[in-house]
Amino acid sequence: MKFLDLQKVNAVYATDLKRIAAEVIDSGWYLLGKYVKLFEEQLSFYLGCKYTVATGNGLDALRLILRAYIEMGVMQEGDEVIVPANTYIATILAITDNRLVPVFVEPDEQTLNLDFSLIENYVTNRTKAIMLVHLYGRCCWGEQVKVVARKYNLKIVEDNAQAMGAKSHICGLSGSYMTGALGDAAGNSFYPTKNLGALGDSGAVTTSDEELAMVVRALANYGSEKKYYNRYQGFNSRMDELQAAFLSLKLKYLDIENERRRVNAETYSILLQNAELILPQQAGEEHIWHQYIVRSSKRNQLQNWLQKQGVDTQIHYPLPPHLQECYPEYNHLSFPLTERLSQEILSLPISSYMGKEELTIIAEAINSFAE
Ligand SMILES: *Cc1c(COP(=O)(O)O)cnc(C)c1O
């Protein structure tokens, strides 16, 4: 059983996707056109934010937000960004690419998201932002983070790459309850395996800050607001019309797909009966289950056992950013919980096309694991 079969994910939409592709091909206009504009409006409406700026991918969306804050004079090289230690490398790359300094903070062991009670200990006079990652699809938001951000005048940037469609029960800064519209700005990814996945690379910045949206839009288009006149030394990071047209279609079905994942997560929590395992907490609408993460002190044996039963699993992620070869300056740091989690976590298949039958097979394979 594959971990994730993208052919199956898109097969349900294949007829419409092919029709849409033909429409875009025949339109003769492939970038910065009406499909991107429409998708931007639809996403802003869905999230309840004022602006969406489509980008080439999710990493660029995050890089662009921080770069825009630098251009706006909100932060400068060498300033610090508080960030969870247990995130995907792209979160950290967006920070260091802008010559900002990531300040790693351990997660909460229950939610696996940033531990809010620790944030304030890490604030210095160089801290300019908190980067929240809604890891595995679980919303990371709370009064505590709002209070600390207000007290020290910090921007709250969300990495919403894994959580499109998740809802907080606590109101965001601009009145929305959706992840991607809780903080000051968010980077979103539509990489094909994400819950809202394109058929190639693409991403978006979402925000209700008009100036930020304008600067990001210019930076993503060579730093130009007016053709051939360049206000900033920008770069090129745009969403294709084709991807935007696909995403407009798939956005309509996102809530249904996320609901299927929620049902799958609940089914797992009923079916999984192995005392070796720590199961993830259920979290209602706060969680859209981009990944379903179980924990075991015998993770590697369990993964091998499942492989032998024909069940593919993955590890998100086996080595935390501070221990990566590309960051020798952080290799000496120690984050015991983050490091232990990277040894214990295992992602089970949980795609929206899966049903009870497949989950039962996987659960039986896991329940029969004994070592
Ligand atoms: C996927 C992902 C990104 C990057 O998105 P791309 O579109 O692949 O560049 C950033 N952060 C997190 C947490 C992700 O999962």
Image (cartoon, helix red, strand yellow):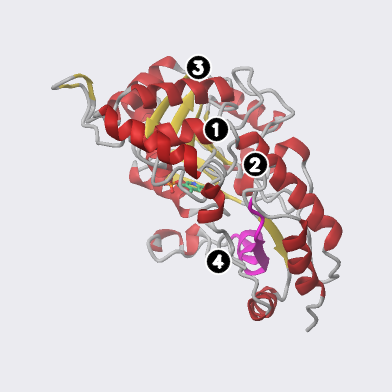
**Residue 50 image label:** 3
Q: Amino acid at mark 4?
A: Pro
Pointer 1: what residue?
251
Specify few, some or many for label 2: CA neighbours under 10 Å numbering under 14, 14-19, or 20 or more: many
For the residue pair 340 and 8, the one nearer the viewer reads as 8
- The range drawn in magenta is 335-351
Tell me the SS state at disc 3. Answer: loop
Tell me the SS state at disc 1. Answer: helix
Specify few, some or many for label 4: CA neighbours under 10 Å numbering under 14, 14-19, or 20 or more: some
Rendering coords of residue 43 (x, y %): 51, 26
Dot placed on the residue nearer the N-terminal end, 2 or 4: 2
Dot placed on the residue nearer the N-terminal end, 1 or 3: 3
> Can residue 115 be spotted in the picture?
yes
Q: Amino acid at mark 1?
A: Leu
Q: Nearer the viewer, mark 2 or mark 3?
A: 2
Query: Does 178 sit above or below residue 346?
Result: above
